[in-house]
Every structure is written in structure tokens, then in C-alpha cells.
Image: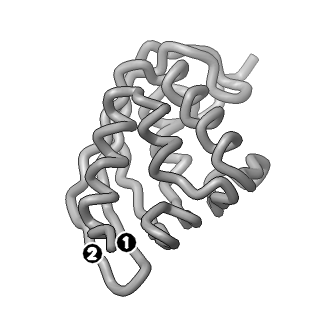
Amino acid sequence: MTDNKSLFNRFGEALNTRNFDAVRELLAPDFVRHCQATPDVAIENREQFIEYLKMDSATFPDSVQTAEIVVTEGDLVAFWLKYEGTQKGQMGPFPASNKRMQLDVAGVFRVRDGKFAELWITWDNLASLAQLGHFPPKNP
């Protein structure tokens, strides 16, 4: 049986090093992501999630995620982490700002057969937009 905290730590290392092959190995093929912060982004399988992560890495090429709290219970892994990065690329309708942001991110993974099968994740979009200089909106 896989230790769920070790699984989470391996996932974080793979994200921070942009090792998407390692990320793929840690996710179930039918992986699903739920996120109120990105309601228009539907992620219903592992490949869609990896593409999302690649886009995030292109936008924030120096991003680092640092786990501050990790709690496991049964098949769940809850976490609180810091996400830091500089916006060097387009983010939705927002052009690169070349500004750095630091966000608190909270989430819960569900583990099935030693792989992550589901994720609930959220963060404060307004805080990120403000730090990047996109909020409040500029008047034309």
C-alpha cells in the first residue's frame, strides 16, 4: 500500500521540477479536478490536468509550490500550500505582468489504488489578480 503523504510529496516534487512524466505516473487515468476558482476549466482526465499544469508552467515558469500543512486520513490527503511565481505569460485575458505573486492554496486529493483520482482545490483569485496588477481593472 502506498503511503499517501509520500505520494503527495512526490507529486509536489514533480510539479516543482516540471517532470510531467512523473506527474502522469501519480495520477489515475480518469483523474478529475474540481475548482471553484476556475469554473470554466473542466478537467475530467489525467491528460487534461497535465495540459493545464503545462499551461500554468508556461504562465509562471518559475513557480514553486511549498506544502505547509499535509494531513492524511483514509484515502484523503488535505493540504495547505504556498504557490509563488512570476507571471511571464498570458493568463486568460490578462497579459504577462512580470510581477510576482504568492498565494495560499487549499485542497484535498482522493487516492485510489496508489494514485490520485480526484482533487478539490481553491485559492483567492482576487488576491492573485491584485498582486499581478490586474485588479482593480484599469480604465481605458
Task: Specify whether 96 is left or right of 115.
Answer: right
Which element type, helix, strand or loop, lies under badge 1? Answer: strand
The three-letter code of the residue at mark 2 reads Val
Q: Which mark is residue 71?
A: 2
Which residue is depicted at the point 71% across and 23% down?
139
Using the image, determine if residue 104 lies above or below residue 4: above
Query: Which mark is first along the chain, 2 or 1?
Result: 2
Pinpoint residue 24: horizontal percent, then vertical percent: 52, 42
Pinpoint residue 138: horizontal percent, then vertical percent: 65, 24
Task: Indicate the quadrant containing the N terminus: top left, top right, bottom left or bottom right.
Answer: bottom left
Using the image, determine if residue 20 lies above or below residue 3: above
Which residue is more in the foreground, 114 or 82?
A: 114
Which residue is more in the foreground, 93 or 5?
A: 5
Residue underneath mark 1: 77
Instruction: Quote the CA–CA distance across marks 1 and 2.
Output: 6 Å
Which element type, helix, strand or loop, lies under badge 2? Answer: strand
